[in-house]
Image (cartoon, grey):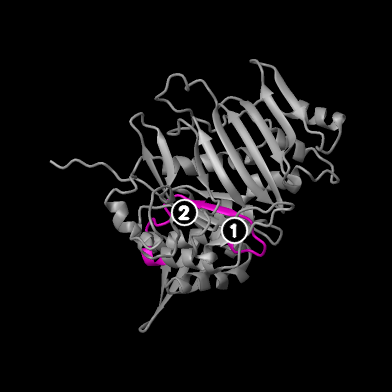
Amino acid sequence: MLIEFSVSNFRSFREKQTLSMVASPRLGKKQNVFDPEVAGEDFPKLLKVAAIYGPNASGKSNLVKAINLISDLLHKKPGDSHLIPADPFRFDRELVDKPSEFEMNFIHEGTRFQFILKTTAERIFEETLFFFPKGKEHLLYSRKLSSETVENYTFGALLEGGTIVHEAWRRLTPPNSLFLAQAVLNSSEDLQQLKSPYEWLKNSNMCIGQNGITTWSIASRSMMMHSPVTKSALQDFLQHLDVPITGIRFEESEKFKSEIGPASKINDYVKLVESEAKTKLTHTTALGDAEFDFTEESGGTQNLMGFWIPWLHLHAKSSEKVVVVDELDSSIHPKIVELLVENHLVADKKSQLIFTTHDTHLMNTKLLRRDQFWLTERDANGATQVFSIHDFQGRGSEDIEKRYYEGRYRGLPILSRS
């Protein structure tokens, strides 16, 4: 569960900007929030949904990239000579050679964590992890670069493993990899303390970029081929959203048949499904059935098929995942987006949906609270500012869409007409 995320000196972000999922008190709509149940803490409720608006090139996509960076880094093989996807704010010469900074505050398995990362593309400058058992802050570890080649490590008194193990983890950690990854990947089964924050940071933040939904549609089709029983679940999902697909089948090439067998894993399907298998979808109307290739489907249908797996993760039993989607409304009708948001709000889940959008229809539905609408805009220096509509005076009953277009909350493009 995400509490809040902060970023500075990254792409269009100059000074520290924060997206908070902490619910403001006394705004009503109880189904829009949930109790995170943190051990030993009377913690505020968290929001289930956040919608981010703003002009083109105002930093919405950069915010999604920033949220994804830690997960992306944890998915890389430790020790590889990869560049870290950190990119400083280029308009300020004083910041160009300084590290980008990220801070993730989250809850997993009843414990609150704070993870801090400062990094350039070449190496990590700082990596710090705190946890809060019974609400009290305790350092697990901290790694800071004190000179060009010297790293100073501090290990908290409550960190499992002991001095010999901690030093072994330290020696295994290259400059461009996270200590957290090395510690978990080189731990025995009885050392579980760091696995909880590692698993959440790596796998619970599912960020889908503007082109990422295509990859997820491949994953959806691969999943159906690997596990045919999931076909009906996808069909039900689409039909619930008024997409009249009543059948799905696959035409496999000889190469596909020769390389895929009973022991094949889902990743084997992903590698071949796009080039060596055709997906055929059956539509049913009053005149009968007709079959279409996946490539003939509308962009909206393809995107919804891609969104299906993230949706499953959001609504899995005991899910604490965060799904972040850049342009959720891409090729999808506003009423379908509204229904997806509504379905997530009424579900008894502690997972969270965050998305960027230009569709202001949601502002007028009264589904979301004022603290669930976020805006981005660039200042005179080209730096992205992130703020909530709740930062402005107003009432829950006000016409948010109307006031937004009137410029009451800012976050609008400044246009000049000839």
Query: Residue 168, percent across and down?
Result: 81, 29
* Apparent side of residue 18 relative to residue 141 in the rendered image (left or right): left
1 or 2: mark nearer the eye: 2
Query: Residue 281, percent across and down?
Result: 46, 69
Residue 41 seen in this snapshot:
yes
Residue occupying the point 55% across, 58% down: 310
Residue 177 seen in this snapshot:
no
Check if residue 333 falls in the magenta segment: yes
Residue at mark 1 to residue at mark 2: CA–CA distance: 17 Å
Whether pointer 1 and pointer 2 mark residues with C-beta atoms closer than 8 Å, the reply is no
**10 or 82, which lies in front?**
10
Question: What residue is shown with label 1?
Answer: 351
27 w.r.t. 162: above or below: below
Q: Looking at the picture, which amino acid does disc 2 mark?
A: Asp
Residue occupying the point 47% across, 42% down: 63
Q: Looking at the picture, which amino acid does disc 1 mark?
A: Ser
Residue 329: quadrant of the picture: bottom left
Question: What residue is shown with label 2?
Answer: 371
Q: Residues within 10 Å of mark 2 (few under 14, many from 20)?
A: many
Bounds of the magenta segment: 313-336
* Apparent side of residue 355 relative to residue 351 in the rendered image (left or right): left
Number of labels in the image equals: 2
- Asked which secondary structure carries label 1, the reply is loop
Query: Residue 322, percent across and down?
Result: 57, 53
**211 or 175, which lies in front?**
175
Residue 363 image label: none
Residue 77: quadrant of the picture: top right
Among the two numbered marks 1 and 2 on one chain, the one whose residue lies closer to the N terminus: 1
Query: Residue 58, percent across and down?
Result: 37, 40
* Apparent side of residue 77 relative to residue 308 in the rendered image (left or right): right
Q: Residues within 10 Å of mark 1 (few under 14, many from 20)?
A: many
Residue occupying the point 74% across, 52% down: 40
